[in-house]
Amino acid sequence: MKKSVLFNKYTIRTTILILLICAGLTNTAFAQNAALGSSTTWGKVDGVAVNGLVQGPSTAEAELQVACVFEYTEGDIFNPPALPANLNGMVHLDDALKGIITELRKSGKFAGHSLETLLIIPPKGTLAAKKLLLIGLGERTKFTPDLMISVGSVAMREALRLGVSNYSFASDIKDAGIDSPTALVAANVVLGSFEAYRTQTYLKDKKLSDHKPLSKIILLAGPAFYTVAGDGIKEAIAKLNAKS
């Protein structure tokens, strides 16, 4: 009888422990998924706020939306390993523009070569942003996170050239099904952006450039990648501010 009681107590304690561990793991998993619309100012560089936002590029409010695409392969943003349509910001962006992004890519009018750019002025009411800038990422099989330093620089230079006071940036790499290091990609975008910003500021001080002051950059991320991206962004901000 005593053995039975001891066994039952042991079983109950073990079960409770397992449930607590499972609950902890579940809470951790949920904690890593930010809610849609979550926003944070990760920090500032040279007076420019670097914000994070859980939002898709079609609905993020900004003067300019930047989105990145690889060279076209049939169904690349719609079929696995691309993210499902309900989580895929590039699909939403394409849908909002009635398929024009896919049409441009498929026809070769915008090939998506590395650092190639295309500016689109969307009809009023189709996107939350006033302008859309596509930046090519080249061949998906040759992608490396280092490319995002140059992509960040191109985005910043184009934003300053267009005279916007803020812009939103979506790498869309996960949307395309590329398993990339989220924190490093986000950090490289920030590093490249402010390398370009500081160059233009230097030229402005020499009266060789005249750009409108930039108030903020908004870096978009999906719910599952928001926190990890933020870690990379904060690391990049700290590195940049250490140089200033």
Image: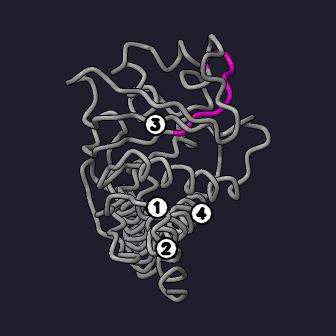
**Label 1 Cα crowd, 10 Å radius (few <14 / some 14-19 / many 20+):** few
Pointer 4 local density, CA inside 10 Å: few below 14, some 14–19, many at least 20: many
Mark 2 crowd level (few <14, some 14–19, many ≥20, 10 Å Cα): few
Residue beneath disc 4 = 188
Looking at the rendered structure, the secondary structure element under dot 4 is: helix
Q: Residue 206 got which mark?
A: 2
| 244 vs 196: above or below | below
Which residue is labeled 3 in the image?
Answer: 133
In the picture, the disc for residue 209 is 1
Q: Which residues are magenta?
A: 68-75
Q: Are marks 1 and 3 in contact (CB under 8 Å)?
A: no
Quick check: 46 above or below 27? below
Q: CA distance from mark 1 to mark 2?
A: 8 Å
Element at label 3:
strand
Name above or below for residue 99 compared with residue 143. Answer: above
Report how far apart the C-alphas of labels 4 and 1 lie in the structure.
25 Å
Looking at numbered disc 3 in the image, what kind of residue is underneath it?
Leu
Q: Is 93 or 221 nearer to us in this picture?
A: 93
Which mark lies nearer to you, 4 or 1? 1
Q: Which label sits in the foreground, 3 or 2? A: 2
Earlier residue among tags 3 and 2? 3
Measured in 3D between alpha carbons, the distance from the residue under mark 1 to the one under mark 3, in whole angstroms, is 22 Å
Q: Main secondary structure of the magenta part?
A: loop
Residue 104 in the image: x percent, y percent?
A: 55, 16
